[in-house]
């Protein structure tokens, strides 16, 4: 099993695009009796997903913001260690949102699985799930916790590297001063602090940050920094 996880990590780190990462994860999942995989990163209310689930289920999941109530996500954040799960343990009675989630998950072939959660930076959580349509999934072969965590981290950083090489649309290109102010914001500096460091008027610094937010379609400076990091701009 160590060799299988090691090979998965190697394939992920050698991937040039998301398709190659998805192919490696699909192959690994199928080899060990799972039909689907899902990589999920949560940071506050923000959710980023990379998976092989049916598109219809992805739309339902994201559209209903099911990460708020998903028992797997909740358990992953609570335990922060690898665990197996089954939809049989989720509420099956009543008319609650959780009941609806359970029914829809089963309908789309997600009934059991194994999840590997990893704590990320700034309060984020990353988790890799292998899912099956069977009532219970055998995760006994996936019990090398250290290698499993390495696989999650490899996916996380490889996706960031691939995103950083993605061409940014011309309208999103920042001016040199916008980029400079953004760099200081990414280092935790406020507009007045950036003004002192650069010699620019504080109101002008704020103007540059506002223009950068507009270009990258960010509502706040923290979101601006996050988007910029995803695109390799900082």
Image (tube, helix red, strand yellow):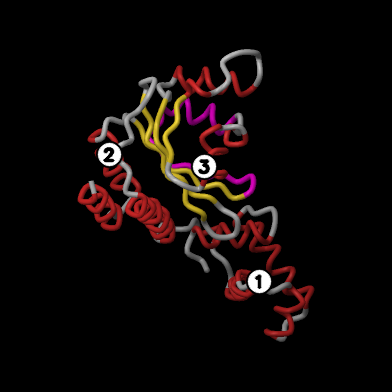
**Closer to the camera: disc 2 or disc 3?**
2
Q: Earlier in the sequence, mark 3 or mark 1?
A: 3
Residue 25 seen anywhere in this rendered image of the structure:
yes
Q: SS at mark 1?
A: loop
Is residue 32 placed above or below 200 in the rendered structure?
A: above
Residue 37 x, y percent position in the rendering: 37, 36
Q: Nearer the viewer, residue 13 or 4?
A: 4
Q: Residue at x 48, y 31 (%)?
A: 58
Mark 2 to mark 3 CA distance (whole Å): 19 Å
Residue 76 disc label: 3
Which secondary structure, mark 3? helix
Instruction: List the residue tagged with mark 1.
Output: 188
Work out how far the residue at label 3 is from the one at label 1, CA to CA, in angstroms.
29 Å
Disc 2 to disc 1, how far (Cα)?
43 Å
* Percent x, y of residue 142: 31, 41
Q: Earlier in the sequence, mark 2 or mark 1?
A: 2
Name the mark on residue 141. Answer: 2
Residue span colored magenta: 44-63
């Amino acid at each position: 099993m160590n060799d299988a996880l090691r090979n998965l990590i190697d394939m992920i780190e050698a991937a040039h695009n998301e398709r190659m990462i998805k192919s490696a994860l699909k192959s690994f999942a199928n080899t060990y009796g799972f039909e689907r995989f899902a990589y999920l990163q949560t940071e506050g209310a923000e959710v980023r997903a990379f998976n092989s689930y049916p598109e219809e289920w992805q739309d339902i999941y994201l559209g209903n913001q099911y990460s708020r109530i998903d028992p797997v996500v909740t358990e992953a954040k609570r335990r922060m260690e690898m665990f197996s799960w089954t939809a049989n343990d989720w509420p099956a009675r009543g008319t609650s949102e959780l009941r609806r989630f359970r029914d829809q998950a089963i309908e789309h072939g997600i009934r059991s699985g194994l999840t590997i959660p990893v704590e990320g930076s700034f309060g984020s959580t990353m988790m890799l799930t292998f899912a099956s349509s069977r009532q219970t999934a055998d995760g006994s072969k996936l019990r090398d916790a250290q290698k499993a965590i390495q696989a999650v981290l490899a996916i996380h950083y490889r996706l960031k590297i691939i995103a950083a090489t993605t061409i940014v649309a011309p309208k999103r290109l920042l001016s040199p001063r916008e980029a400079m102010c953004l760099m200081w914001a990414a280092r935790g500096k406020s507009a007045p602090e950036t003004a002192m460091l650069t010699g620019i008027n504080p109101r002008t610094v704020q103007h540059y940050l506002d223009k950068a937010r507009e270009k990258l379609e960010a509502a706040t400076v923290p979101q601006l920094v996050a988007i910029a990091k995803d695109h390799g701009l900082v």
